[in-house]
Amino acid sequence: MLFKRERSINVNVNKGRHRVFARILVPYLVFLMLPMIIGWVIYQKTTALIESEATASHMNLLEQSKDILDRRLEEISSITQQLAADTRIMRFQSVTDPFEGTNTYRILDTNKSLYDYRMSNNFIFNYYVLFKNSEMVLTPGASYSLQHFFDRVARYSKHDYDSWYDFVAKQFHTRKTFASEEVIVQGVPYSMLTYMQSLGYPGNPQGAIAVMIDQKEIQKLFQGLNISEGGWAYIVDGEGEIVSELSASKAPLPIEIGNLIGDKGVIEQSLQSNQMMITYTKSSYNGWTYLVGEPTFVVLEKVRYIQKIIFSLTFVFLVVGVFIAYVLAYRNSKPLRNIVNMILEKTDVVSHQKDAFRLIGETVTGLFNNNHRMKSEIEQQVPLLRAAYFQRLLNGQFISARDADALLKYVGMDLQGMLYRVAVVHLRGFDNGYNDNLLEELDMKRLLAKEMLRRTIDQEGFVYDIAEDQFGVLFCYRAEQSELYKEPIEQKLKEANEEMKSQLKLVSVYGVGGLCDSLTSISRSYEQAREALNVQLRKNENEIVWYDELPTDMNNYYFPQDVEIRLINLAKAGDHTEVQHTLDEIYHENFELRHLSFAVMQLFLFEMWGSLVKLLPQMELDQQEIYRRIQSLSSEIDSYENMRKNYQSIRVTYRWICESVNEHKKSQNVQLIQSILGMLQNAYTDSELCLDVVADRFRISKVYLSQFFKEQTGINFSDFLENLRMDRAKNLLQTTDLTILEISDKVGYSSSNTFCRAFKRLHGVSATSYKKLHG
């Protein structure tokens, strides 16, 4: 019979193995047909998709370039409008002789008012203001005559001086951007766009504001375009002039702008025997047209490349896929086959189920049913788990609140964020000897008493067994109810006491512990409740006793470890105020609230001196004085008055430590500020000298250095350095024949313009005028 059973099992195992393998392999083979269909669809869609993506990429590039350039030109327009509205520039338009009377100072004043916009706008190469009547040109930081400016500063290669003058000074231009042309700036050729805004009125121009834009800044907008295969990019203004171009051949515009339809679009056109795909868009701001052209074969070459990849990958995928499908089917079916084999081997009855998956499903369903049955049995054990949990809480066996909270959720309770208080209930009458009948009666009364107590407490607490004649009650309430706890607790305990007395003839005694705010501190409240209960039992009374109302213990002094650590850290920091405040708290607790005995007070004072002994080696201070005072301690405790004097000596010692710490800090501060001032005196001629350099030199943060310098000297770091340089500059102006440029370099300024502005701001006159007056 056993042989027949094993043979039946082997037959079923083999059949199940093949069925599982086949059911897993077939989906893989069906899935392998999808790449063939997908590859054909991709091949059909790729050409249109690549072409669409290429044109979309070019259109995005054009739109971004157009938006950026429109914003830049709008910024330049705003700058020229501000310059044209400047009162200094408007007054200077009518000046004919720039060197007559105060006109020279007017030139300087007007030139000073010109802001160098290159510092805030890298799109601007430079700009100049041309005045027709005075034949002057002003640029940021300099002024020129028209002839000198054209010959030496910015020469337009396509113009001679007369044609340039007629174009700039005699024609009226409003927000006009001219196509790029070669401009020789101080001997270096550049390809420049010129933005022109005339001064005055149409028909009566008084000059012009011209902004020069380097074409390289515009060409940066097309950096993402590949022109190596014959591609190009152009920006054309409304008159058909090429504003900017990016082309390897530098050929003229290959198409007619008038043939473009609409504000944007894509056309395919044959140019010089090459089929080109042209993307264009038109700006609504200034009417400029942006064009990008790329040979069609470049775009379709990507399609052909993708076509080869698709067909190659499809073939490889089919070959490799069949092999992988077989391997995966075998591999993935192996765990299922092992499960089926294990089920058949572990099952006493031979299964006639032909479907291996259904067999597994039935087995898993049975496991779930068993699991639910086990959960039901575990739920019946929850009261025991809760009792064990409360026992651990009372005994203080939880080291961290996190462990207590985690186990609390496991037993199905939520007591987080509450205040707690423990009461211990003692039943009198359980200590007069026992016999079988009495034990049975007492057990019955104890169970009834516990139920009465639980019913009276209701939702405000939990009752659990402590001993044969004692119960523990854990009261829980919200923080806002902490001031109203006493009366409800007394009322409920008295109600329970009256009910037990009237129905069970039992007298109960209650001890209530102190308030606690965490689960891990419930054990402390429990010990306090037991202490209060023991006091009541010793007095042989039956009332409720609160631990908070017990007399203060005379045998325990107050100096916990956390207070000691805090006191030591405050002394190390030299915080005398907080140290004295902490010492006051310790004094108030031990000398005023607790009536300690002489022996306990002596231990307390020895521990206070011991803290000082631990502190002094860390501070590298003299310890002999401390040891002398400790030796005289035993002869100074014959009265409470001498104890107070001894504690006052501890105060004085802590004050001495704080003063020593602060004196050490002060000496370090004096040394540091002297070193900083010495460095400034020696290195102020260095133009790179600044707050960051000094902070790096002394290895401190610049924020701390700035605050420290202001506290020690009463003046900001930058103001001190500037005054130091200016004092030296005034001395050089008075006693030497050095030029302004030489003096600015000697006192640590990187440019004479910066030096002159700072000098006039501080002294009210220019450096040149000061030299004339005091030199």
Image (tube, helix red, strand yellow):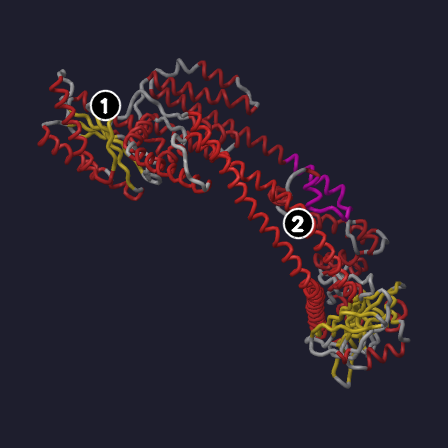
Residue at mark 2: 318
In magenta segment, residue 681: yes
Instruction: Please tell me whether residue 702 is drawn above or below residue 80 in the rendered image.
Output: above
User: Which of the two discs, 2 and 1, sits closer to the camera?
Assistant: 2
Quadrant in the rendering for residue 437: top left
Q: In this view, does 313 lie to the left or right of 241?
A: left
Q: Which of 762 and 400 is in front in this view?
A: 400
Q: Which residue is drawn at 57% across and 31% down?
A: 663
> What is the crowding at mark 2: few (fewer than 14 residues within 10 Å), some, or many (at least 20)?
some
User: Could you say where residue 68 lies in the image, as x and y percent from the top left?
Assistant: 69, 66
Q: Can residue 274 be seen in this view?
A: yes
Foreground of the two, 425 or 539: 425
Which amino acid type corresponds to the residue marked 1 in the rendered image? Answer: Ala
Residue 464 in magenta? no
Per the image, the residue denoted by label 1 is 467
| Magenta range | 670-696
| Numbered mark located on residue 46 in the image | none
Task: Name which quarter of the figure residue 364 lies in.
Answer: top left
Sequence-wise first label, 2 or 1: 2
Q: What residue type is labelled 2?
A: Leu
Q: Is residue 343 above or below residue 264?
A: above
